């Protein structure tokens, strides 16, 4: 960490490829050697999210919480490998500390462009429009969100939007607040603990804007997740299977609808 900071101070743009959990051991250096001096170091955080076969010491489920409170940093997570390349390119051009989190395992199979694009900092991607519910998903949860949205439309006749958040810090508050002003329910999905995570940043933004929109946060509970045979097995054990998440969104919509009917009586 100190070596990377030294390279950046000498005018270079170093990359630090590291497991999310290993970065925890360098928290002091991250803050004082890199962020405090606003140095252009790009951190590629492997195993950000669940890492089932590696066990509880390697699940990268805490990095959003311990990074988003640090000034000067930008935190990104791509939905696929093509967007990962774009984020690496964006990090190089940024000129300040950048963190790109991505999960263990193969990519989605998305084709990679010949030339990467620089992303506009703090701008999310609207993949699907919706007027009843909007799912704000991060990283691998984008695919789950699209499946949930399609199913809610087909089975419950609901108009469900999907946003690829892309940026945890800075959060796309302009888009979030514009949607929350007209959409009754915002749902966040993240491969991270709920405590201090992406959903928490959404709640904070809405509270600061005095926006009363309902929010349902989906992520990992406040506990250490054990070793598992697969992502699917651990998700099922903690209520994060595709079926569980679908049911949770639908149940929250039904409760919210009932509350609105009672309020109108």
Image (cartoon, rainbow, N blue to C red):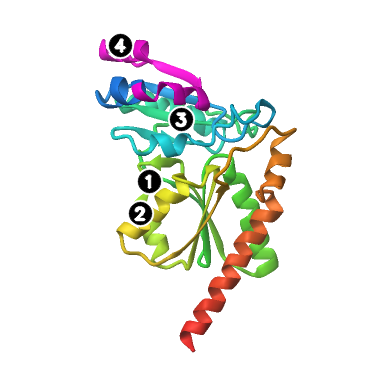
Q: Is residue 215 magenta?
A: no
Secondary structure at numbered mark 3: strand
Label 2: which residue?
205
Q: Is residue 227 visible?
A: yes
Secondary structure at numbered mark 1: loop
> What span is colored magenta in the figure?
1-28
Q: Residue at left 68%, top 51%?
A: 242
The alpha-carbon separation of the residues under discs 4 and 3 comes to: 21 Å
What percent of the width, then of the height, locates residue 234? 69, 40
Q: Nearer the viewer, mark 1 or mark 4?
A: 4
Q: Residue at left 42%, top 61%?
A: 179
Dot placed on the residue nearer the N-terminal end, 1 or 3: 3
Dot placed on the residue nearer the N-terminal end, 4 or 3: 4
Dot placed on the residue nearer the N-terminal end, 2 or 3: 3
Dot placed on the residue nearer the N-terminal end, 4 or 2: 4
Judge whether 252 appears above or below 25 on screen.
below
Checking the image for residue 171, the label placed there is 1
Q: Is residue 90 visible?
A: no
- Mark 2 and 1 residues: CB-CB less than 8 Å, in contact? yes
Checking the image for residue 100, the label placed there is 3
Q: Residues within 10 Å of mark 1 (few under 14, many from 20)?
A: many
């Amino acid at each position: 960490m100190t070596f990377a900071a030294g390279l950046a101070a000498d005018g270079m743009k170093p990359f630090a490829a590291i497991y999310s959990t290993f970065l925890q051991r360098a928290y002091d250096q991250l803050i004082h050697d890199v962020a405090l001096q606003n140095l252009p170091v790009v951190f590629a955080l492997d195993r950000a999210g669940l890492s089932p076969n590696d066990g509880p010491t390697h699940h990268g489920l805490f990095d959003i919480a311990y990074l988003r409170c640090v000034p000067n940093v930008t935190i990104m997570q791509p939905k696929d490998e093509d967007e990962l390349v774009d984020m690496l390119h964006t990090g190089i051009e940024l000129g300040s500390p950048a963190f790109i989190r991505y999960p263990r395992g193969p990519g989605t199979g998305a084709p990679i462009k010949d030339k990467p694009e620089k992303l506009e900092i703090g701008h999310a991607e609207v993949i699907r429009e919706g007027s009843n519910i909007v799912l704000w998903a991060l990283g691998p949860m984008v695919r789950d969100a699209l499946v949930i949205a399609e199913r809610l439309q087909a089975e419950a006749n609901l108009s469900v939007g999907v946003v690829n958040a892309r940026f945890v810090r800075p959060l796309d508050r302009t888009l979030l607040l514009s949607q929350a002003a007209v959409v009754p329910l915002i749902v966040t999905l993240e491969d991270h603990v709920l405590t201090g995570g992406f959903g928490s940043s959404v709640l904070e933004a809405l509270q600061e804007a005095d926006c009363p929109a309902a929010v349902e946060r989906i992520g990992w509970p406040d506990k250490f997740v054990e070793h598992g045979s697969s992502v699917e097995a651990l998700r099922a054990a903690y209520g994060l299977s595709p079926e569980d998440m679908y049911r949770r969104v639908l149940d929250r919509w039904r409760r919210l609808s009932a509350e609105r009917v009672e309020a109108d009586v």
